[in-house]
Amino acid sequence: DEHCQTNLPNVYAIGDVVRGPMLAHKAEEEGVAVAERIAGQKPHVDFNTVPWIIYTSPEVAWVGKTEQQCKAEGIAVKTGQFPFMANGRALGQGEPGGFVKIIADAATDRILGGHVIHAHASELIQEIVTAMEFKAASEDIARIVHGHPTLSEVVKEAALASSLSGIALSDLEGRLDYVNPAFCALWHIAPEDAVGHLAIDFWQTPRDALAVIEALGASGRWNGEMVARRPD
């Protein structure tokens, strides 16, 4: 049943033979929950926050709902995505492939799911898991100081992209007029579209870069396609 109890007295079942993902860490938590229940406590395992991990190269990890699941359930969402190719630590380690994606409720900003594709995805997904357990918003992760240079900065930037989703181009109008041509080449944005909106230095201020990306996308002047390569 939902408490892992079988139809035999004092016999419980956990792991792959019961509902939920066939993962060792999920089975471990069920074992703890069963032990606590036998001891008279009232344990709880949230299967929505169990991280799914595929130990390939690169690793693939996710937690919570996918964007497609949310749409199928009629949940309005906003998403943020950030590539490891723009992360100094990933470049220094020779592991620039992959990205982090955050899915949040469009109205409340509460994190509903997250995905990581990277050599160390199994380690990085845990920050999103923890945030979801505490009902955090994407802005909560975005405002937490992350060490630099670390791979975890990509989680922060993806959360920032999600929390900034829907920013109006008018919000950026006239602030600064310098545009880094390397940034424009990387994201296939015409320089004339970005001039006059924000100072962009992609390698130093990804927060500003993401704001411009969101704004240009909302204005219809950029199709939002991410390019998985660095400029020459």
Image (spheres, grey):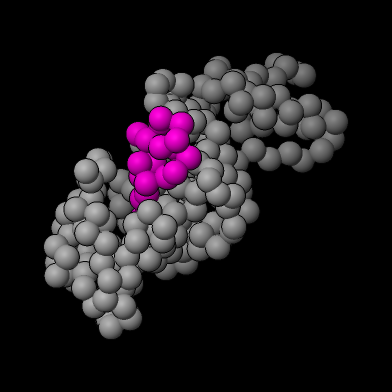
Residue furthest out toward the right:
39
Instruction: Note whether residue 139 is visible.
Output: yes
Q: Tell me which residue sits at (78%, 32%) in the image.
A: 37
Q: Which range is magenta?
A: 77-97
Please say whether residue 81 is one of the residues in the magenta stretch.
yes
Q: Tell me which residue sits at (85%, 31%) in the image.
A: 39
| Percent of width and height locating residue 45 | 64, 38
**Which is nearer the eye, 130 or 67?**
130
| Percent of width and height locating residue 86 | 37, 46
Q: Is residue 132 above or below residue 9?
A: below
* Drawn side of residue 32 relative to residue 211, left or right: right
* Drawn side of residue 157 relative to residue 14, left or right: left
Tally the numbered discs.
Answer: 0
Quarter of the view holding residue 218: bottom left
Q: Tell me which residue sits at (58%, 52%) in the image.
A: 146
| Percent of width and height locating residue 203 | 38, 54
Quarter of the view holding residue 43: top right
**Which is nearer the eye, 163 or 3?**
163
**Which is nearer the eye, 102 or 231?**
231
Q: For the C terminus, give its image quadrant.
A: top left
| Percent of width and height locating residue 161 | 39, 59
* Drawn side of residue 197 relative to residue 25, left or right: left
Instruction: Note whether residue 61 is visible.
Output: no
Please say whether residue 33 is one of the residues in the magenta stretch.
no
Q: For the N terminus, give its image quadrant.
A: top right
* Drawn side of residue 106 relative to residue 49, left or right: left
Q: Tell me which residue sits at (52%, 38%) in the image.
A: 124
Q: Is residue 24 above or below residue 208?
A: above
Q: Is residue 190 above or below residue 124?
A: below
